Amino acid sequence: MTATPETRVPIAGFVEKTPLERYAAPERPSLVGLSRAELADALGAVGVPEAQRRMRVGQIWNWLYVRGASGFDQMTSVSKELRAALAEKFTLARPDIVAEQVSVDGTRKWLLRLPGENVGRPHEVECVYIPETDRGTLCVSSQVGCTLNCSFCHTGTQRLVRNLTAGEIVGQVMVARDRLGDWPGGTPPEGAIVPTDGGRFVTNIVMMGMGEPLYNFEAVRDALLVVQDGDGIGISRRRITLSTSGVVPNIARAGAEIGTMLAISLHAVRDDLRNELVPLNRKYPIAELLDACRNYPGVSNARRITFEYVMLKDVNDSLDDARKLVKLLKGIPAKINLIPFNPWPGTRYECSDWEQIEKFSEYIFNAGYSSPVRTPRGRDILAACGQLKSATEKLSARERMALRAMAMTD
Ligand code: SAH
Ligand code: SF4
């Protein structure tokens, strides 16, 4: 059973937003994000004989994903005639960058514009790059807005929902690599912070931007298969983490069809509280969610599931919660990621006191779990977890200032 509209039954207190708008393909679609089979079809559409398609797909794949070509004219190993024929029908376009912001800590956030269904009303999503010394993590969005409405999440308050296409998801990786100079022979922009180990700049992907990836299953799967492809972008599935609020039937599917690492937004250890924080829990309660985790293919001590736990003052941060958390996860190879709550204007929650976060973390650590507290990154540019909300529903200048001030206080 998948979470399709047909199988939805009303559940008190749980609302699934239905997409208000759809993707509207441009006149000349982009080849970015197509599977090899789709690319072969595109070649067929410009008259490439079937016997040649496989070889041509390999060439174009290499130009696109190994060398970062942004125009057909760069593909010098492809005949001029074919390049011209392709350019007539297709592009290699990535999402348009509306704005790029750089945090004092080197985090970069791009606001990206995607075609909307109505002329003059484009859709927008955000994509965030988080550099560390030995890795560079890209936080990628899967939807404009989010189907769900977790009470502590800013994206959840957004009304407009539209699923991104696979091309728009892969496009975020392309934009980041373009802007960071992360192609052979490229150099990062002046002053940019990137990993210093001499390797690539985008080494890890987390599906933790806007949206619930498992409510856009096919596009997320297709995009992540392109990103994993060893003859292309080549980011291994162990370096890709898909985060879900708990769409249980699609967790097994993700394991079978995508095979990346899994993160679960748990946030509460009791169903009554999780029903409030993550209303999807009313449909898929904690016990079912943890069963799906136990059965996730390939899970082992070397490949643990990450449990995300947002620290909300006096809501879920007592030592009793920590105790129950440890008990609940018994037997599941797990990592626990404590996330300090990032506030936004109008929220009823506060971030737990630092002392309490430390006590909570210590309890979990003593129970044998690595329990890193996720250092908020890019708070000054509103790039931290749960602060992403595209300008589709614009904040007033006053709200934006309040948001920044709140995010900067600790
Ligand atoms: N929809 C998916 C992935 C995107 S959210 C999911 O829910 O897992 C990425 C992470 O940020 C989730 O763990 C989410 O619970 C957390 N998050 C959302 N709002 C937050 C906030 N205001 N402060 C801290 N973390 C937040
Ligand atoms: Fe959607 Fe995740 Fe935010 Fe919940 S936490 S509203 S699932 S983006």
Image (cartoon, rainbow, N blue to C red):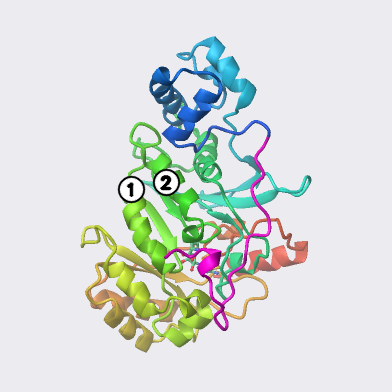
Question: Depth check: 377 or 86 in front?
Answer: 86
Question: Depth check: 380 or 207 in front?
Answer: 207
Q: Quadrant of residue 355?
A: bottom left
Q: Classify mark 1: helix, strand or loop.
A: helix
Residue 15 among those drawn in magenta: yes
Please state which amino acid type lies under the numbered disc 1: Arg
On the image, the x and y values in percent for residue 44 come to 50, 24
| Residue at the spot 55% in from the left edge and 27% down from the top edge | 70
On the image, the x and y values in percent for residue 119 come to 78, 45
Question: Depth check: 158 or 87 in front?
Answer: 87
| Residue at the spot 43% in from the left edge and 25% down from the top edge | 57
Majority secondary structure of magenta residues: loop
Mark 2 to mark 1 CA distance (whole Å):
8 Å
Residue 172 among those drawn in magenta: no
Q: Classify mark 2: helix, strand or loop.
A: helix
On the image, the x and y values in percent for residue 356 come to 42, 81
Q: Is residue 58 left or right of residue 107?
A: left
Q: Is residue 29 left or right of residue 324?
A: right
Residue identifier under label 2: 224
Residue identifier under label 1: 237
The span picked out in magenta is: 1-26
Q: Residue furthest top?
A: 80
Discs 2, 1 touching: Cβ within 8 Å: yes
Q: Is residue 165 above or below residue 332?
A: above
On the image, the x and y values in percent for residue 117 come to 71, 48
